[in-house]
Structures are given as C-alpha cells and as structure tokens.
Image: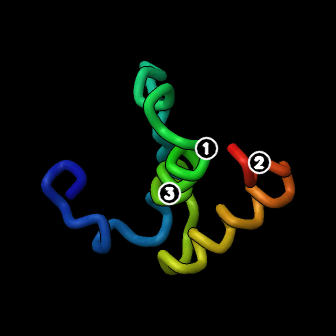
Amino acid sequence: MINGVPKEKMGGNFSALSAYVQQDDILFQTMTVRECLEFAAKLKLKGSHQQQMDRVDEIIKELRLNKC
C-alpha cells in the first residue's frame, strides 16, 4: 500500500517515480554479499522472483564474488 492505495492500482510507473535509499548501512554489515544483492533486487528489479535471483547470480559471477 502506498498512501492507502494498493501498489498495483498506481499503474506501472511507481518504480520509475520512486527509489529506496538506505539511510543506515548497519544492516549490510550483518548480511552476506548475496543477501545484500537480493535485498536490492527485490526493491528495484522488475520480473519474477526467479528472474531477480538469476540476475543476482549473474552479478556475483561477473564481479567474481562467489567466495564472498
């Protein structure tokens, strides 16, 4: 819900008009690289959950962060 209106009823422009900016990075100190990227993907990427997780896997592979 956004201002009492279901997100689905706001049209497809909501993600283009909004962004999430983390004010405190304490959460990231306790999260793995994968958890941080999944968190960001769930907030911003479109597509199914599986598509988001596939993109996270691609980024981890591209940045060679598998061991992190």
Crowdedness near tag 1: few (<14), some (14–19) or many (≥20) residues, C-alpha within 10 Å: some
Between circles 3 and 1, the one closer to the viewer is: 1
Quadrant where the N terminus is found in the figure: bottom left
Between circles 3 and 2, the one closer to the viewer is: 2
Do labels 3 and 2 touch, CB within 8 Å? no
Residue 17 on image: x %, y %: 51, 50
| Residue at screen point 68% across, 68% down | 55
The amino acid beneath tag 1 is Val
Above-or-below relation of 40 to 49: above
- Mark 2: secondary structure: loop
In the depicted view, which residue is nearer to us: 55 or 57?
57
Quadrant where the C terminus is found in the figure: top right
Per the image, the residue denoted by label 3 is: 15
In the drawing, does residue 12 fall left or right of residue 56? Answer: left
Task: Give the spatial CA distance, label 2 vs label 1.
Answer: 8 Å
Residue 32 on image: x %, y %: 54, 42
Residue 51 on image: x %, y %: 60, 78
Task: Give the spatial CA distance, label 3 vs label 2.
Answer: 28 Å
Above-or-below relation of 9 to 63: below
Per the image, the residue denoted by label 1 is: 33
Figure disc tally: 3
- Mark 1: secondary structure: helix
In the drawing, does residue 11 fall left or right of residue 3? Answer: right
| Residue at screen point 49% across, 26% down | 29
Do labels 2 and 1 touch, CB within 8 Å? yes
- Mark 3: secondary structure: helix
Q: Which one is earlier in the sequence, the residue at label 3 or at label 1?
A: 3
| Residue at screen point 65% across, 62% down | 56
The amino acid beneath tag 2 is Leu
Q: Residue furthest left?
A: 4
